[in-house]
Image: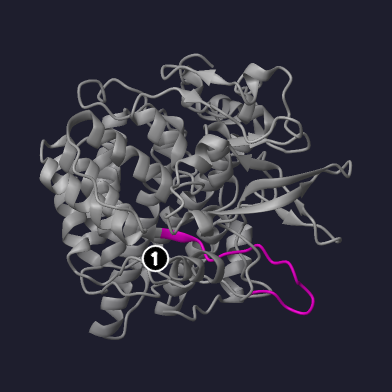
Amino acid sequence: MKKLTYIIFFVTTLLSLSSCSNLDQSPYENISSKDTFEKLIDAESWVNGMYIRLRRSVYGTYVIANEVQADLLNVTAFGEYKNIHRWETFTVSEPTTREIWFEDYRTIANINTALEGFPKIILKNAEEQELLNQYIGEMHLGRAFLYTRLATAFCKVYDANTASNDLGLPLEKVYDVKTKNQRASLQETYDFILSDITKAEDLLKNKTGAINADTFTIDAVKALKARVLMYMGKWEDAYKVAEDLISTNTYALATSSDELREIWHKDNAQESITQLYIATPDQLPSTNDIFFRINSFKEFEADYVPTKWAVDLFDDNDHRKRVYFEKVELVTPLDEYYPDIYIVHKYPINETLSTTTISNNYAHAPKVFRIPELYLIASESAFKNNDEVNARKYLNLLREARGLSSVTVNGDTLFQEIKNERSRELAFEGFRLFDLKRWKESVIRRTPQNTEFLSGTPREQYYELNRPADDFKFVWPVPARDREHGKLQQNPGW
């Protein structure tokens, strides 16, 4: 469904359901449900509305917050998001994490309303029933995707030994204006996520995955399932799901910098399992706009630059280095110039979206699921399941595609190579903070490229930051408004 019809009726209804502009509105507040469940086209409208909201949230604030809090970036003197980046000034009232919580729960509330309303739709024939089943499956997968994001950000890492007692999420399973949920356990949270994935697996079994898919397919179900199972430490199951998806050979790994440039700079969908539809001027996504911009004088500015350590993770033979980074002369708002500075160039100006009125368009089609992640899941899960042969196999398949030589190491050295490869491949996509969290590793910013244009007072809160793996701020705080409204227990330390 490459050309989604974003129906004006639904957009108007969606805006009445949840005002996106008011971040002080709780996701648990009353949402007025209209009589919009009569025909199949109404269901299509609700599903398209979910993708509209995902288009605004997959990239943007969620990716930015996870990356700036982690260890691969340094903030420049005039950069934003400094509270999260510094850790010390990251407080329970932080608007960035509050926005992520509210926006995801608003989308979940809309999904719940749709899932309750879909059974009211009068269908004409078996073909319409099949389409409705697929729409229901897409909604279940969307909800599972959002709860997974929330769980990784606002909860501890899943541990089967403690999950029944660990704080999970407030689970809004159906739409009920009177519901003021307490937090479920982490076990209940992941059980619910897997339940949604199982429903989607059944309902989307006939929606075959394909390159250029801009909505959820059965392959998207497998991608999220493998991710969640790995996050739960269910290594054998995660490996099987990842291997099954890889073995379809539907999605080929890019094997040159030119192919990678087409993927990241021009939205080629070669490696994408799901890549959301975008178009100018009215169907554009949120952007990962902290990495660089070109000013009116054609000069490069940046809020954040990669650390030297991050750049050095990439060998010169690595195809990604020439795509993910660009060496430029950086200028500050004070007209200070710094030559030979690497910027993150994974989300550059999108030539396919630039128009006569918008020459510098940094929007990109959000890549919800990519096949390289499945190679990484297969490799890490195999290693954790004491299968170093297949751990090396899938690690080396990805490495070789990216221009690197294969490795023959084992044990702890192999695991470090797996982690390094994940850090390279998924850099600046919003995975880094949770990866450090689940690997029980500290956030250490290591060596910067240059300190002269960085924010740096006090240094230990910026480019010399070192926060231990057990720091409570790895787990984001529940927003104060929802604590009061829903009597939700706060995460420890906040």
Q: Image check: 137 left or right of 76?
A: left
Q: Is residue 442 above or below residue 77?
A: above
Give residue 389's position: percent from left, percent from top. 11, 45
Q: Position of residue 254 (x, y in %)?
A: 37, 67
According to the image, what is the colour scheme of the structure? one colour
Q: Quadrant of the C terminus?
A: top right
Asked if residue 355 is among those painted magenta in the image, a careful observer would answer yes
**Placement of 390 over or under 492, stated as above or below:** below
Which residue is tagged 1?
274
Rendered view: 352 above or below 28: below
Query: Start and end of the magenta stretch?
Result: 353-368
Q: Quadrant of residue 114?
A: bottom left
473 vs 464, nearest the viewer: 464
Question: On the rendered image, what quadrant is the N terminus found in?
Answer: bottom left
Give the residue displayed 29% in from the left and 58% down from the top: 400
Instruction: Say which of 261 and 111 sits in front.
Output: 261
Depth check: 455 or 314 in front?
314
The percent position of residue 368, horizontal first and vertical second, equals 43, 58
Which element carries disc 1, helix, strand or loop?
strand
Whether residue 488 appears in this view of the structure is no
Count of numbered circles on the image: 1
Is residue 144 shown in magenta?
no
